[in-house]
Structure formats: structure tokens, C-alpha cells
Amino acid sequence: MVIRKISPNLALDHQVSLRRAAGEPIVHLGFGEARLPVFPGLVERLTAGAGRNSYGPVPGYPGVLRAVAGYFARRAMPTTEEQVIVAPGSKALLMALQLVVPGDVLLTEPCWVTYAPQALEAGKRVIGVPIPAECGGVPDPDALREAVRAARAEGANPKIVVLTAPDNPTGTTATPDLIRRICAVAEDEDLLLVSDEIYRDLVHDPGFEYLSPAEVAPSRTVVVTGLSKSLALGGWRIGAARFPADEAGLRMRADVASVASEIWSTLAGPMQEVAEYAFDEPAELVARRDADSRLHGALARAVQDIVVKSGALSRPPTGGFYVYPDFEPLRERLAHEGVVDGESLQEHLVSRYGVAVLAGVHFGDDPRALRFRAATSVLYGDTPELQRAAMEAADPTTVPHVAEALAAIELAFTFSKAAVR
């Protein structure tokens, strides 16, 4: 039986809201939201689409399917309109895939908090695989092969591998070499790759060589994306998926559309107007997105610098807006303060220092590990005015409210007595 509970990141966000309402000053690093003002052109398209109040076709209107196909084609994945579908968020598409694709699921340890619950809801077995030393979001290729064969020996049916690049929670991005090696394992072991590329357009270095598994293994890769992160539209719920072009891929797309017809019917008409504009990628929107990516990179690196100065460990962030510290080097010191695992570290930071993070255990990490995810995008501010100040600054770390938050984080991560409240 699946024990159902609110997703831990949403639960933490609610708890922080209650603490703030009670007057507690909290630096909230626990919720993965691109907290920035909506680009004006998107608001205009939403307004223009307000009259689209009919249900419309389940996969999406022709205009938005054309735009989504073009989006993928510009990323070295030739795509037709018959290969794509839109939905109210990529989350819905990921769940639909779990329902229509048979077999058990291989997930990285750690991985995004939703992957495992969705697999369990679909009645699948979850098989954890460690990540490589250099990055998260993808399984270590050799460990993946071993996990598949061990699972089969135990009677499981591993069939689906979920990849994320850039990764949530580690903020790192898989290299082309790793992607090719994982694709080779998928070919050898007959696995479907589900590539969650919702952070793809937020790679910090424009020169980074990004490789999608759909470029290497097109017949066995489904790509999922959305506008929540790259365009700060989390509350608008716009997602899209690309399926393989062969008969099996198109059948999978039809099966996902069948699930959609019974659960969400179609993406809301006004949001399809927004999606068509966004996936067409007009120059003014791309410029804003690229500027946002630079901002995300600057704040993620600033927090990672604090982590390293504290004596903890952290992979350098390369995409999105996350840092994933490991405080194992400080375990003995933390034990004197009652911190023995990830959850007690999470509680210690918020209760004693007013800094909210989400423990690694919620991402499938070792419960004893002193690791957590810090979402740096909330540092831009709680109002559009503060967020614009961070966006427009040559060095966002020097903007007063951002600098104040970074100072609070430094006191917390160094466990300074000056931060004790």
C-alpha cells in the first residue's frame, strides 16, 4: 500500500509560510521556484488567450504543437507535430508516462522528490542507483548496468531510467561522455530513457556542450520539459513532451494522450496561447531567459562559495538554481549540537539559525548523510521590486537584501554562535 503524504518540498514551503506569519525571519532555501517577475510579453499572450475557453484537442492546438516541435528541432532533435504533446505541467506528463509504460523504474540517488512517489503510485518498484562523482541527475553507467542485472535476478522488471540535466537537487549537469555511456547501457539492456530537461535552458555557461540522450538514442528516449523554471511560470503549469518518431514512440504518445483525456482533458486554452509564444522563442524572450540564467548562476556560485568556506563539500553548480552541500567533514562538531543525520540538520538550521533547507533524505539520499538541497532562487526577494533590483544589478550579490540573506546563510552554514536566536 502506498502511504500518501504531501510532497516534502511543498510541505516545507507551507511550514515556512506559517513561521513567517508568526513573525519569524526565515531565509527560505527549501523551495525550488524561479522567483522572478513574469516577462511582460507572456502576460500579453495570456490576456490575448483569455477568450479561448473551449476544451480543444487533447494533445494541444496545432499552433502550440508546431512551436514545441520547433523548440526541440532547434536543439538537434528533429521533431514533427505528431511527436509532441502539451499538458498542465511536466509533472502530469511524467505521471502519465509511469502509468502507460510497463516495467520498474531506475532512479538516481539523490533525485527530485516526485519521481519515486509517482512510480509507487503507478504500482512500480523503485530501484536506486548511485550518481557519478562529478555530477547528479544521471546514474553512474557501470552501477546502472549492475543494478539492472541485479534487479532482474531478484525478479524485478527494470525498464525505465529517469535522467535530469541540469539536475535537481545537485545543480549539476551531465557531460556528453556520461550521456553516451548511459545510452549504451540503455541499448544493451533494452531500457527507456525519460530525460527531464526542464532546466536545460538554465545552464550557466553558454559554451557548455549539452547533449540530450534523444540525440544519441532517439528511439528509446522521451524528453519532458516545461516553462516553470526557465521562464519562472511555475504557477501557470505548462509542460511538454517529445516522443520517439517510430511506431512504438507514437503509440506511447497516443497512450499518454489517452491518460490525459481522462485526467486533465487538455492544457488550458489561455496557457496554450502562452506556450505557443514561449516555445517559438522570440528574441526578446530569449534575452530575458539568458539574463535570468546568469543571475541564477551568480547566486548559486555565491552560496557554494559559502559552503566551501565553511569546510563542507559541494559540487560546483552548473545549471538551474541549486546547491547540494555535504557537511560530512563537520559531523563531529555537529554531533555536539544534536545533529546526526539529514533531517536533524534541516531542523537545526531552521530552528536555530532561521535558514530553511530540504534534507537529502527527501531526495532518496542516505538518511544519515549530512546533505541537503539549497534553492538559491528565493534570494532575489519576495516582491517584484526586490527581484528586479537583483536582476538589474551588475553584481547581484551586492544588492542590500541579497547581501543580507547571504550573510545570514554564512552565519548558519558556519554554525556561528552569533546567529543563535
Image: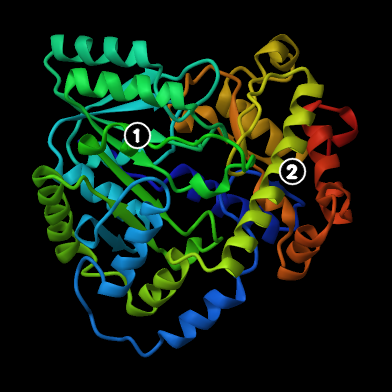
Compare residues 108 and 418 and report the one nearer the observer.
Answer: 108
> Which residue is farthest bottom?
51
What residue is shown at x 66% (from left), y 53% (from top)? 19
Q: Residue at x 20, y 17 (%)?
A: 188
- For residue 14, what is the image quadrant? bottom right
Q: In the image, is residue 258 above or below residue 363?
A: below
- Residue 259 rendering spot, x and y as whole percentages: 15, 57
Q: Secondary structure at mark 2?
A: helix
Name which residue type carries label 1: Pro
The residue lying at 12 percent from left, 53 percent from top is: 255
Circle 1 is placed at which residue position?
Answer: 213
Label 1 sits on a secondary structure element that is: helix
For badge 2, the amino acid type reads: Ala
Q: Nearer the viewer, residue 230 or 122?
A: 230
Q: Which residue is at a point 17% across and 37% down the rendered structure image?
A: 123
Q: State which quarter of the image contains the C terminus.
A: top right
Is residue 145 positioned above or below 8 on the image?
A: above
Q: Looking at the image, is mark 2 or mark 1 nearer the viewer?
A: 1
Residue 61 visible (yes or no): no
Which of marks 1 and 2 precedes in the sequence? 1
Relative image position of residue 120 (x, y in whole percent): 24, 36
Residue 298 circle label: 2
Whole-Å distance between the Cαs marked 2 and 1? 28 Å
- Quadrant housing residue 359: top right
Q: Residue 56: x, y in percent?
A: 22, 78
For residue 78, above or below residue 117: below
Residue 159 - label: none
From the image, which quarter does the N terminus lie in? Answer: top left
